[in-house]
Structure formats: C-alpha cells, structure tokens
Amino acid sequence: MNEQQVNELLTVLREQTEAQRAQTDAINRLAESNMALCDVIIQSLAEDDGVEITSLNDLKPQYLSQKVRG
C-alpha cells in the first residue's frame, strides 16, 4: 500500500469507528427504553391483578406463579 491508500484507509476506519459509536449509543438508548417500558407494563399488570412482583436484586426472586427461581 502506498501512503495515499493508507491515509484513505485510516479515514474510512475513523468514520466506521464513529458510526459504530453512534450505533452503540442508539442501541443503549433503545435498551434503556425497553427496560423502562417493561417496568411500566409489569407495574401495570401487578396493580391490575394484585400480583406481587420481584426484581433481579431479590435474594430469592419468584415467578408470578410464586415458584422460586434459580
């Protein structure tokens, strides 16, 4: 490769890296949005049905059927 080709390759790689960072940021925002939506749905269902909910931080999390997970 000559110097011009190397410079062009570096430019393209920088652009690709920037695009991947932007894509990663968008994916992270989508994941956060999905988690928030799930929380709202779960809370709404729990309020409607009087179902006790658990979180991943619980020492003994349970399914909605009250069966212990894990």
Image: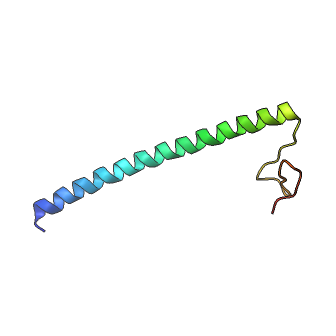
Quarter of the image containing the C terminus? Answer: bottom right
Q: Residue at x 75, y 39 (%)?
A: 42
Q: Quadrant of residue 59?
A: bottom right
The color scheme shown is: rainbow
Q: Position of residue 6 (x, y in %)?
A: 17, 62
Q: Residue at x 23, y 53 (%)?
A: 11
Q: Quadrant of residue 44?
A: top right
Q: Nearer the viewer, residue 23 or 67?
A: 67
Vertical relation: 9 (above or below) 18 = below
Q: Residue at x 83, y 44 (%)?
A: 53
Vertical relation: 53 (above or below) 50 = below
Left or right, 19 with respect to 10, comes to right
Vertical relation: 10 (above or below) 34 = below
Left or right, 25 with respect to 2, comes to right
How many numbered discs, if any? 0
Q: Position of residue 15 (x, y in %)?
A: 29, 50
Quarter of the image containing the N terminus? Answer: bottom left
Vertical relation: 36 (above or below) 66 = above
Q: Residue at x 28, y 56 (%)?
A: 13
Residue at the outermost bottom position = 1
Q: Position of residue 37 (x, y in %)?
A: 65, 36
Q: Quadrant of residue 41?
A: top right
Q: Position of residue 66 (x, y in %)?
A: 89, 51
